[in-house]
Image: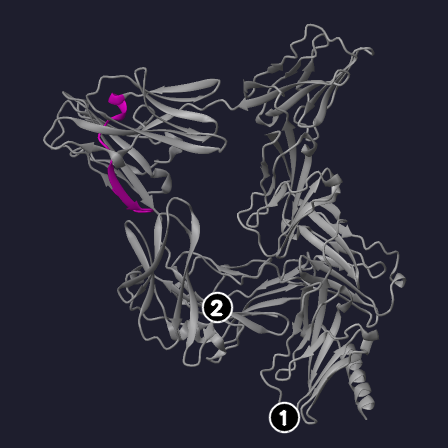
């Protein structure tokens, strides 16, 4: 009877497989060889009449059973040739199955049968990394094939499984017994990029990205073949020269701050097949006995970064060390110098030529060679009277090397930073070498001295006024920045190998007659800027702010304009290079504006007041942001400065719910929300609960998007609002919890797929309703409709990768609708208040609603009315 029941189960399994539901309930599980793994039933307790069956699908073999009605529990130790003997454990309460001391032969499909429910597990057991591993390199955007090495699949047994794994995740498998060929997208990482060769089992990855770099494994039962895939074009492969004195320690740094769980780190020496250290999962290993034991007790791995330290170095440790991780490859060229080795330091300014002198008057041996970081770059054969120049593998020396036939000296022309490093002239016959350490320095930029108004101070009750300055340089390395008073050093700051910006402050009295200079120098050159106190130590600009599009008036501090006054208005970073943009000449009773200067940015925008001397700029734009000077000529010359800041108009923040972040407890539901703004600068975004500040985030001069999260309970009756502000304006969006949180936890009637977004826009502006799709799949139909009347307004059908049909049903929207063919997002241009309403978007071929957009279009008279009523119509976007 039991045998008949098992046959019935196996027949049902085969019938189920043919029905095509295999992928829907497959649960991949992985474990390292030798460890234990538990296949969880998902039950907390087995019912009294429960029947639990564990079946291996490779040969449809029963391996464990719990029959609660018969009060029996059993494991089949002799099944599958006894390969599971003494290694299976059943949990009596939950029915979960544990396999101990796993081997790669345990890799297989296992099915759990609980009465009428089925659950499939695909168990992958990783073998321990061996010494042999194939390196594969590909350019980003190209395709690559990882070859199985099989000519066809007849070479493997019918019950064998072919599995492809990336790091620790199953990405493809072939089952001969079920004739199944399946690829997985690894949570979207390999979307539509994996192809299995049905003849050989080889795996092809198309349109490679940097994220696809890493460890791939082909596993056919206990046979494992590994591939390290390096993708060029993202994190560049690098050659790092490193040197050390013999007997000292040296560390080869990975550049990582922390090892991630999916990192594989391999350290190899000279021969790429010789691994000297590796990090995999939680295992850190060094191999002391390889290469005749030359590294014995000398290798140390940093458990946080994976960096490798070699202690007590010897010349036999010199050579190439290769670091391979799942995301990059770095080659270290290690030079170990003996105590008697002499290295001559040579410096040159970038762009100049430099000669590495051999010190010989005449070459007296047959062969000389020049080597740069262990690569041959020049060869002299005296007997054959022949000179050969070799280009370095990346072309850095092309047409730049010149050899002196008589002395063997090497000249490098038009030097660049890439030419810095160790050069050696080798005399192989006598075993001699001459070493040169060349450093190529960039030409230092001229320092810039500017007024630092934030630090300026005046002494109370005194006529002495102090001015603060900053001397600055950008993108410099190996330099020192200094302030001098005459020939006396006042202060300095240095930077070594990092390319950064430097600033050095100085405070002086306005009446100071001493000479001050700011000097930037490296070991072979310098640049100097002298301080002109009279020019720079003017009163700090008066701060003036204006909203983009509005007018702003700049008022000079004059009680009255004299008959002999000439007032010139200038615009620019300093008075010496500022352009005259307007002028009032009381002597000739004339007013002039200069529209054609500065790319005509002020055309038809400047107005002068003949009575006050003030300047008005109308219809301001960001290009009008800057410093304005009023130069007043008369009996006394005076200068006044004004810093005008033009701020963009603020859009109303958008509050959206994130259903993927919703959670629930026994008594309440929580909803995660995001308040967002796009393309903003010089703003702060806030969440308020009533009048109490909850959180904030700011951005200065970068134009970016900001988002600020908030989590609330659905039952929360407090008022919440999201506010964006800059120094002169703000916009507020109030949170409607009942409207946005109905998608959380599926409690409030909408599908768990639905995401609600509130969008506000000012009348006349454009608004885009984003679907968040990256690409519309082939055969997808997208429709935008107007709900109450079911009015279709936009339709798109993608028939292939390049073919579309596109239809806009005009009417109330006219030609104001634009659909993004790539994402399906809808843009409404030149919005009107009648466009306010509810828009919905549906994705997939099953007409599943994905988004609802609550759009509010505000007229000018409504901007400051927070209690305005919403004029709602209903629209629907359907993506099928």
Assign a secondary structure to mark 1.
Answer: loop
Q: Nearer the viewer, mark 2 or mark 1?
A: 1
Instruction: Say if 117 sits above or below 657 in the image.
Output: below
Pick whichever of labels 2 and 1 is earlier in the sequence: 1
Residue 618's spot in the image, x, y percent? Answer: 30, 42
Judge from the rendering whether residue 488 lies leftward or rightward of residue 564; answer left or right: right
Q: Residue furthest right?
A: 154
Query: Which residue position is annotated with label 1?
Result: 48
Res 275 → quadrant: top right
Residue 309's spot in the image, x, y percent? Answer: 60, 40
Q: CA distance from mark 2 to mark 1?
A: 37 Å
Quarter of the picture holding the C terminus: bottom right
Res 162 → quadrant: bottom right
Q: Residues within 10 Å of mark 2 (few under 14, many from 20)?
A: few
Res 712 → quadrant: bottom left
Q: Is residue 800 visible?
A: yes
Q: In terms of depth relative to the viewer, which is nearer, 262 or 581? A: 262
Instruction: Say if 556 sits above or below 653 in the image.
Output: above
Q: Residue at x 59, y 85 (%)?
A: 45
Q: Residue furthest front?
A: 297
Q: In terms of depth relative to the viewer, which is nearer, 87 or 13? A: 87
Q: Residue furthest top?
A: 361
Assign a secondary structure to mark 2.
Answer: helix
Instruction: Say if 510 sits above or below 772 in the image.
Output: above
Q: In terms of depth relative to the viewer, which is nearer, 416 or 863? A: 416
Instruction: Say if 140 sits above or below 341 in the image.
Output: below
Residues drawn in magenta: 533-552
Query: Which residue position is annotated with label 2?
Result: 661
Q: Is 826 included in the stretch rendered in magenta? A: no
């Amino acid at each position: 009877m039991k045998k008949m029941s098992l046959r019935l189960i196996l027949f049902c399994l085969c019938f189920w497989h043919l029905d095509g539901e295999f992928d829907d309930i497959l649960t991949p599980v992985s474990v390292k060889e030798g460890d234990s793994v538990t296949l969880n039933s998902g039950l907390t307790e087995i019912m009294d009449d429960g029947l639990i069956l564990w079946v291996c699908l490779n040969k449809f073999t029963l391996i464990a059973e719990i029959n609660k009605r018969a009060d029996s529990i059993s494991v089949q130790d002799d099944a599958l040739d006894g390969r599971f003997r003494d290694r299976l454990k059943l949990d009596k309460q939950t029915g979960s199955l544990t396999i101990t001391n796993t081997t790669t032969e345990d890799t297989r499909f296992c099915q759990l049968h609980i009465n009428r429910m089925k659950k499939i597990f695909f168990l992958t057991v990783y073998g321990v990394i061996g010494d042999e591993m194939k390196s594969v390199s590909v350019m980003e955007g190209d395709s690559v094939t990882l070859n199985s090495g099989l000519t066809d699949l007849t070479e493997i047994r019918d019950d064998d499984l072919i599995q492809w794994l990336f790091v620790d995740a199953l990405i493809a498998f072939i089952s001969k017994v079920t004739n199944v060929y399946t690829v997985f997208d690894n949570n979207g990482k390999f979307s539509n990029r994996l192809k299995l060769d049905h003849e050989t089992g080889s795996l092809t990855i198309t349109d490679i990205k940097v994220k696809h770099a890493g460890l791939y494994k082909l596993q056919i039962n206990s046979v494992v073949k590994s591939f390290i895939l390096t993708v060029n074009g993202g994190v560049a492969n690098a050659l790092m020269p490193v040197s050390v004195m013999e007997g000292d320690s040296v560390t080869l740094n990975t550049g990582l701050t922390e090892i991630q769980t999916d990192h594989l780190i391999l350290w190899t020496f000279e021969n790429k097949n010789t691994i000297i250290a590796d990090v995999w999962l939680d295992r850190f290993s060094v191999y002391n006995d390889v290469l005749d034991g030359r590294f014995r007790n000398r290798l140390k791995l940093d458990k946080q970064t994976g960096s490798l330290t070699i202690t007590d170095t010897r010349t036999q440790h010199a050579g190439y060390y290769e670091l391979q991780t799942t995301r990059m490859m770095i080659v270290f060229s290690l030079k170990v110098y003996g105590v008697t080795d002499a290295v001559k330091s040579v410096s040159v300014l970038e762009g100049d030529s430099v000669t590495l002198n051999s010190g010989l008057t005449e070459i007296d041996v047959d062969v000389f060679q020049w080597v740069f970081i262990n690569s041959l770059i020049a060869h002299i054969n005296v007997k054959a009277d022949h000179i050969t120049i070799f280009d370095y593998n990346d072309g850095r020396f092309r047409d730049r090397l010149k050899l002196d036939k008589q002395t063997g000296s090497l000249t490098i022309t038009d030097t660049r930073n890439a030419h810095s490093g160790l050069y050696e002239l080798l005399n192989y016959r006598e075993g001699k070498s001459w070493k040169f350490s060349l450093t190529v320095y960039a030409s230092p930029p001229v320092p810039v001295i500017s007024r630092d108004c934030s630090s300026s101070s005046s002494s109370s009750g005194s006529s002495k006024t102090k001015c603060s300055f900053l001397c600055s340089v950008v993108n410099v390395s190996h330099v020192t920045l200094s302030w001098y008073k005459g020939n006396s050093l006042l202060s300095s700051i240095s930077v070594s190998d990092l390319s950064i910006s430097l600033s050095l402050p100085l405070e002086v009295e306005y009446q100071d007659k001493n000479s001050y200079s700011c000097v930037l120098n490296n070991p072979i050159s310098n640049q100097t800027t002298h301080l002109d106190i009279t020019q720079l130590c003017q009163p700090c600009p008066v701060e003036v702010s204006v909203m983009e599009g509005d007018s702003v008036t700049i008022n000079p501090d004059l009680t009255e304009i004299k008959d002999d006054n000439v007032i010139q208005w200038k615009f620019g970073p300093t008075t010496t290079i500022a352009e005259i943009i307007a002028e009032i000449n009381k002597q000739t009773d004339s007013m002039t504006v200069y529209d054609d200067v500065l790319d005509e940015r002020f055309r038809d925008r400047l107005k002068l007041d003949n009575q006050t001397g003030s300047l008005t700029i109308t219809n301001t734009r960001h290009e009008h942001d800057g410093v304005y000077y009023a130069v007043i000529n008369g009996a006394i010359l005076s200068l006044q400065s004004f810093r005008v800041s033009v701020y963009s108009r603020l859009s109303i923040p958008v509050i959206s719910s994130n259903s993927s972040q919703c959670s629930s407890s026994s008594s309440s539901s929580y909803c995660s929300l995001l308040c967002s703004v796009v393309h903003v600068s010089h703003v702060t975004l806030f969440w308020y609960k009533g009048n109490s500040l909850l959180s904030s985030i700011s951005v200065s001069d970068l134009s970016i998007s900001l988002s600020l999260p908030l989590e609330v309970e659905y039952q929360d009756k407090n008022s919440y609002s999201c506010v964006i502000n800059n120094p002169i304006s703000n916009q507020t969006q109030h949170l409607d919890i009942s409207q946005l949180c109905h998608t959380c936890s599926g409690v409030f009637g909408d599908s768990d797929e639905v995401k609600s977004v509130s969008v506000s826009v000012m009348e006349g502006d454009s608004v885009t309703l984003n679907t968040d799709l990256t690409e519309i799949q082939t055969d997808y139909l997208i429709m935008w409709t107007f709900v109450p009347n079911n009015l279709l307004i936009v339709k798109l059908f993608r028939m292939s990768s390049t073919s579309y049909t596109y239809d806009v049903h005009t009417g109330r929207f006219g030609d104001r609708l634009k659909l993004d063919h790539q994402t399906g997002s809808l843009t409404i241009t030149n919005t009107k208040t009648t466009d306010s309403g509810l828009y919905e978007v549906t994705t997939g071929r099953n007409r599943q609603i994905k988004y609802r957009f609550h759009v509010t279009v505000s007229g000018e008279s409504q901007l400051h009315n927070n209690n305005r009523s919403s004029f709602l119509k209903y629209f629907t976007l359907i993506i099928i």
